[in-house]
Image: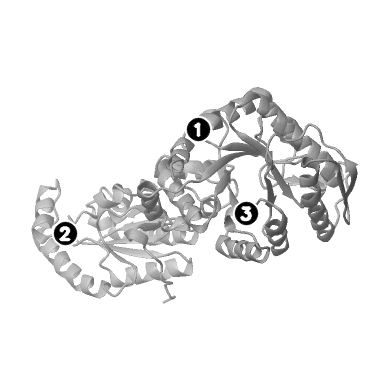
Amino acid sequence: MARLDRICLVGESIPDPSLVILVGPSGSGKSTWAANRFRPEEIVSSDRLRAMAGSGEHDLDASDVAFDLLDRIVASRLRRGLLTVVDTLGLDDQRRANQLDQAAQAHLPAVIVVFDTAENEVRARNRARMRPVPEKVLTSQIRRYRQVRTRLDEHPHLLVAADQPVEPQHSAGAAVAATRQRRQPRSLRFYLQISRFPSDNLAAEVSALALAAERSGFAGVAVMDHLVQIPQVGREWEPMPEAYVTLSYLAALTSTLELGALVTGVTLRSPALLAKMIATLDVISGGRAFCGLGAGWHGAELLAYGYPFPPAGERIGSLTDALAILPLMWGPGKATYRGRFHYVEEAVCYPRPIQESVPIIVGGRGARIIRLATERADGLNLSNATGIEQHLALVWQGLADAGRSRDSFEVSVLDSPLIAVDRADLASLVEEHRGARPHAEFARRHHAGLLETHIGRYRELADLGVKAVFVAPVGIVTPDSLDPWKGITAAFAAG
């Protein structure tokens, strides 16, 4: 049998996806317990399959066909990485071993849930049924369960049926972290990243979305600085308005939102021109601008618009020059600087920004980018993929080497989450947006989960030292789509 890797059942939660095998005699409460936690599509029940293959759930002549179907369905779901709940008596050692083996081969955790219901309760429930199990058969099941139960104590992921929550495997521990946030809150700021734009009535719909973000407790709004839509988000012929024109429009409509591009590529504008644009944005917004800055990566759009796309080393060199020129342009007097790729000669930038120091946030994850950010910028934005802890270790080391305190620097994360109101809604939203990608892969990539899951996730980021989160939520198309975020921003507002 394939080895089952050990998993951590944080707070006795059930990972999604996983294999869940229910074990208990008739009347022990397995089906009711499962129905209260899982969607019907996730439960593979021998009784239901017997009803489909025969004249009803009690048609024992259909048992062989029903269990053959059950084995095939379980195997298929596990191969596809889907949460699968096996609702049978669970007393067949060979069938249970085969299912555990299939889960291991699919790299899914497997949980055995046992139902230690008192014998008198089991018998009372059985007698109350329309078609009770014969007493001799039930006695045999209870005896068999006691034998199997002793052996199952050795299984590393055994749960005694209780009030276990179902928690996404990609967010293990989120439920515990959410409880911690409710009891001992930490503060965290949230920014809405608008990465897709409507094709009809762009101005009205974008303004409505920004105003909804303001009402929902977001600290700011960011847009992407791209000339065409990027392949990670949509199709290249989708609307992609120019970033700083859009931000200027939003500055006139809003009153509290911080505004900026996440992030501006240094390959598209000279640093001096960018300094002038951001200073203007800061003035017309009343001091609400921030500067997201990156080396640029989407060569295809630059070449299509007639711009060169230099090698990575030159782009990082341009970023280095920009990080020197921007503060000079925003400071007192005239700015003079000669770098490898950019220079200014007694340049003036009036009007000055209202803010004494417009925050500069560098976007990227590479060691060179992190080193540059910790030496010259006010913050770093990381995409919320794997390895956050390792990248943060580089940040803390870079700050120490630069002689800077952690308080002088802000780490933020870019996240693209999917939030649902319940598990049925969650499955529906994943199916709606996943396209050709597998269900489980899409759910993992976008941390698909309920409100409490995301509160827990963000609390874990706050515990690591993250101060802000830029979110580009899946399925945000109307102002009403932001309603769930009121609960998240409120949960982190009073820390």
Which residue, as the protein is rendered here, is positioned at the far front?
333
Left or right: where 259 falls relative to 469: right
Q: Is residue 257 above or below residue 2?
A: above
Left or right of 142 in this view: 394: right
Q: Dot 3: few (<14), some (14–19), or many (≥20) neighbours within 10 Å?
A: many
Question: In this figure, which residue is indicated by the disc labeled 3?
Answer: 382
Q: How far apart are labels 2 and 3 at the CA level?
A: 49 Å
- State left or right for residue 46 relative to residue 473: left
Percent across and percent down for residue 275 are: 79, 40
Q: Secondary structure at mark 2?
A: loop
Q: Which residue is mark 2?
A: 117
Determine which quarter of the picture holds residue 91. bottom left
Residue 393: tell me if it is visible: yes
* Residue 311 in picture, x, y percent from top left: 84, 58
Q: Are marks 1 and 3 in contact (CB under 8 Å)?
A: no
Real-space Cα distance between discs 1 and 2? 46 Å
The N terminus - image quarter: bottom left
Residue at point 47%, 69% (across, down)? 105
Q: In the orientation shown, which residue stands out farthest toward the right?
A: 345
Q: Amino acid at mark 3?
A: Leu
Is 480 on the left or on the right of 93, as rendered?
right
What residue is shown at x 19% (from left), y 61% (from top)? Answer: 25
Mark 3 and mark 2 in contact (Cβ < 8 Å)? no
Question: Tag 3 or tag 2, which sits nearer the N-term?
Answer: 2
| Cα distance in 3D space between marks 1 and 3 | 24 Å
Residue 91, numbered label? none
Which residue corresponds to mark 1?
A: 216
Residue 242 visible somewhere in the drawing: no
From the viewer's side, name the closer residue of 76 and 412: 412
First in sequence, mark 1 or 2: give its number: 2
